[in-house]
Amino acid sequence: MRVAHPAFRDELGDLIRTGVSNGHGLLAVGKLRSYGDSCLNGDGSVIEMPGLDHLIRFDRQHGVIEAEAGVSLDEILQVAIPAGFFLPVTPGTKFVTLGGAVANDVHGKNHHRAGTFGRWVRQLALMRSDGSENVVDRDDASGLFAATIGGLGLTGVITRVTLDLMPITSSRIDLQTIPFGKLSEFFALAAESETSHDYTVAWIDCLAQGDKLGRGIFTRARHSRDGGLSVSTKTGPSVPIEAPGFLLNRLSLSAFNEAYYRIAGRPREANAGYDPFFYPLDAIGGWNRLYGRRGFYQYQSVVPPSVAEAATTAMLQTIAAAGQGSFLAVLKTFGDVPSPGLLSFPMQGTTLALDFANRGAPTLSLLDKLDAIVREAGGRLYPAKDGRLPPAMFKAGYPALDHFTPHMDPGMSSTFWRRMQL
């Protein structure tokens, strides 16, 4: 694999021409925070974009920022917060690039109000393998804008993005945590909170069984009215070595989940900085080493509202029976806010995201069982977080695929796309 690290946009033309001459094509990547193979291009060429991290323009009056695709969300926050603005949508890590956020059309804890990241993109510039640079915006009639939002980097190299920011009066967060004992209580809390709170999310005990099945901790939050506009610069500890695989077993995970539910699940209200609420894992460097040398699979699904409770119950029962749960299990609802991207993952419904330590065949067998539940429910999986998404399930879950493929750049490819055999 050939890798380039440009520092200036005027280097891209030559790099793209050289890269696409390889038999496996070219892929532009960011900080490689995707868990699957959508950001890989084995045996092909890769352009790493983080060196293209220049801010081009910031309209402090209207909250509009234009930046190169390699700028990180953290770097945007450092400029936006002191001016009284915040990211309109943010994923669970701020260490992703602007281009990566667009290419995966990331979502956050406020989908019920704000939708996906792509809804806030005003304009983007896309360099194609034929040497042309296309500037497209929300009103683009060609379909290239819609294909690029959530398009996994396959429509060309995103070079710059113009993004609407969200006004805030404080960078602090008012939050409330509420324990719930079963899934029906989660759905009631989520529905109740949609009109009153900007952000909603729940941790769920995926190993609980019997009358404890579906228990968890619901958190709802909004931006504080006061408290200043300070930027977080804290860094936390790092996991220095890979943990032995046997540490993450059913007994240790069950004990952790039980303790966490009892301690963290006490009803409370708090005022916190934005970092611990939005980006808790960013405080732990190398946290993935906790899963040992064999690593982990992340599995994130979304299922429609009409079957959400039944499908989520079936998934939790399957996970608990297998004893391969996760201490990082997140349950959220997506609102009826359509994504602009043709291949965007979020749709109205309920999304469940979990990490599974890689135990080989038993883990893959469990994921196959979860696939069957999600597919029967009419749901889909998130390509950015799934390194083993079956091609048939990808095709079934993304009905706009036929509208997307005509906009693909013939010089772009990825390990994921070739694995899909599309």
Image (tube, grey):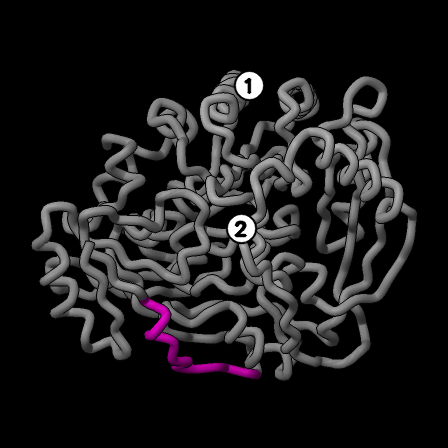
Percent position (x, y) of residue 132? 15, 64
Q: Quadrant of residue 54?
A: bottom left
Q: Residue at x 26, y 60 (%)?
A: 157
**Secondary element type, mark 1:** helix
When the figure is inspected, residue 108 is found, relative to residue 186, above or below; the finding is: below
Query: Quick one: which residue is furthest to the right in this view?
Result: 267
Percent position (x, y) of residue 245? 56, 39
User: Left of 312 or right of it: where is 361?
Assistant: left
Please tell me whether residue 53 belongs to the stretch shown in magenta.
Answer: yes
Q: Residues within 10 Å of mark 2 (few under 14, many from 20)?
A: some
Percent position (x, y) of residue 13? 15, 69
When the figure is inspected, residue 142 is found, relative to residue 309, above or below; the finding is: below
Q: Nearer the viewer, residue 67 or 238?
A: 238
User: Left of 175 or right of it: where is 310?
Assistant: left
Percent position (x, y) of residue 203? 73, 42
**Secondary element type, mark 2:** loop
Task: Kindly identify which numbered label has been placed on residue 242.
Answer: 2
Q: Residues within 10 Å of mark 1 (few under 14, many from 20)?
A: some
Q: Residue at x 42, y 50 (%)?
A: 104
Q: Residue at x 38, y 76 (%)?
A: 53
User: Left of 235 or right of it: where is 293?
Assistant: left
Quarter placement of the C terminus: top left
The residue singled out by tag 1 in the image is 373
Instruction: Inspect this view and state whether residue 275 appears.
Output: yes
When the figure is inspected, residue 112 is found, relative to residue 14, above or below; the finding is: above
The residue segment tinted magenta is 49-60
| Figure disc tally | 2
Amino acid identity at mark 2: Glu
Query: Quick one: which residue is furthest to the left in this view?
Result: 21
Q: Nearer the viewer, residue 115 or 410?
A: 410
